Image (tube, rainbow, N blue to C red):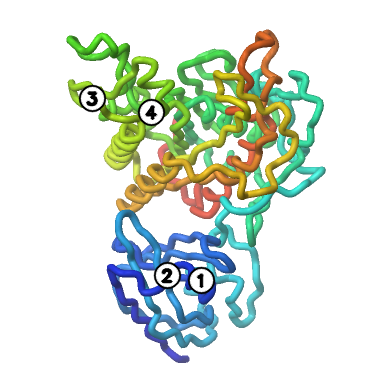
Amino acid sequence: MKECIIDIKLSDKPLIRSSECQQKSNYIIVFDGSGSNSVSLTKGMFKGGGFSIWLVNRYRFRLRSCVIDISIGCLVQTMSYWISLFLEALCLSVANDTTLLSRFAFLSSNVTPNNSHKSPLVEACDYSRGRWVWDETYHRQLYDENCPFLDPGFRCRQNGRKNERFRKWRWQPDGCDIPRFNASDLLERNRNGRIVFAGDSVGRNQWESLLCMLTQGVSNLSKIYEVNGNPISKHNGFLVMRFQEYNMTVEYYRTPFLCVIGRPPLNSSSNVRSTIRLDELHWYFNKWVAADVLVFNSGHWWNPDKTIKSGIYFQEGGRVNMTMNVKEAFRRSLQTWKSWTLHNLDPRSFVFFRSYSSVHFRNGTWNDGGECDMQTEPENDPTKLEIEPYYNIFVSGVVKQTQYERRKAHFLNITYLSELRKDGHPSKYREPGTPPDAPQDCSHWCLPGVPDTWNELLYAQLLSEKFGINKIFPERG
């Protein structure tokens, strides 16, 4: 058996431009300087090929199996600097070392080990890029509007929407498939555990979706209940739904800014009605500490209309900063979130920060006549999509920083697939009793609908991380 040495050279200048990379290389192995020796997989960032990150803690190592024919490595931006890699040599011969080959699952389309067959690998896929495909059977696989845990405002068909085509589109990632959601499997993996959602009302949208998806694995819906007896609808605090058969909970905490919002310090300007304390996470955080899975989101409330123009300014320590803009405040709030995550969460917890959920107001804003009720099909022209929101850039960056500390943190990227679904909002089909001249809802999503796909991606990522295997979290009474 031959041995092959791969030399990796680091440079602070690009060795090859990404435009050239698109033409010359299908797969890239990248060192990101984190010092970890685990494998993190992404795919599909470059036209005509994939992109993979191999985290290593030394510059020279030996391999004994043939996995791919590749000779060019390309640059990648990691945090605030460029790292470039060049693969000097790659001369590997086929071996039956399945343990080693499994570490190269992202090259599965090129692996040809002896006495083996190709199989779909969860780790190989970037689920965030793809297309919506028509599937007549898709909407029947999960749940319907009769799920008892849906807000009236999300039951679009019952609220008068005649066109149900929006329920029959299925997300198809490029180059791979999403594992079919298995409610019984996820419930079993999280037996005696907790899944927590924390964020704004779009996070509640996703929470209700997951509750309904999980009902498919429960024989008696009366065994699912809110532990404090609170009704689901019109509740602004937190809700804890217990699945009695599995002794597990799925929880939602309403905290649009994630940080504390409260009265300003004494002697503040009369323009300051309240402040967001950027250096203090919401007091709910004490309830999140022992969760097995946490899904955070923030962004929709981080805009001038809901902050500065409403008399809500930003505070750090005892000082109110009257000149700080919303973008900088959001960035600082994420650093507070990261610090709390690193110092308070069990390293075994799986932490997700969901990307920004797209809104689709046309001919105005949410409070200025914006509408979306005429949108009946997904967008099929990607050139018409909005640019990447700065929220995502900040969130993905802070998640990466958290990963450097060897935490199970993930950026749940749903923005692109959601941006295409301009047809998926309640629009004018709001809950009964809504005044006829009320603004249309082009921010939240009809259920069943797009957030179901978010949860399918969440499930897929948990599978890829082997969530629930050999679980050693203490059992709860």
C-alpha span from label 4 to label 2: 39 Å
Q: Secondary structure at mark 3?
A: strand
Q: Are marks 1 and 2 in contact (CB under 8 Å)?
A: no
C-alpha span from label 3 to label 1: 47 Å
C-alpha span from label 1 to label 4: 38 Å
C-alpha span from label 3 to label 4: 19 Å
Residue tagged by mark 3?
A: 321
Q: Secondary structure at mark 2?
A: loop
Q: Is residue 433 left or right of residue 28?
A: right
Residue tagged by mark 1?
A: 27
Q: Quadrant of residue 73?
A: bottom left
Residue drawn at the location 33% of the way across and 37% of the way down: 331
Q: Earlier in the sequence, mark 3 or mark 1?
A: 1
Q: Is residue 297 left or right of residue 321?
A: right
Amino acid type, label 1: Tyr
Q: Earlier in the sequence, mark 3 or mark 2?
A: 2
Q: Is residue 183 visible?
A: no
Q: Quadrant of residue 448?
A: top right
Residue drawn at the location 47% of the way across and 41% of the way down: 389
Label 1 crowd bin: few (<14), some (14–19), many (20+), radius 10 Å: many
x and y percentages locating residue 19 in the rendered image: 48, 68
Residue tagged by mark 4?
A: 258
Q: Is residue 317 left or right of residue 340?
A: left
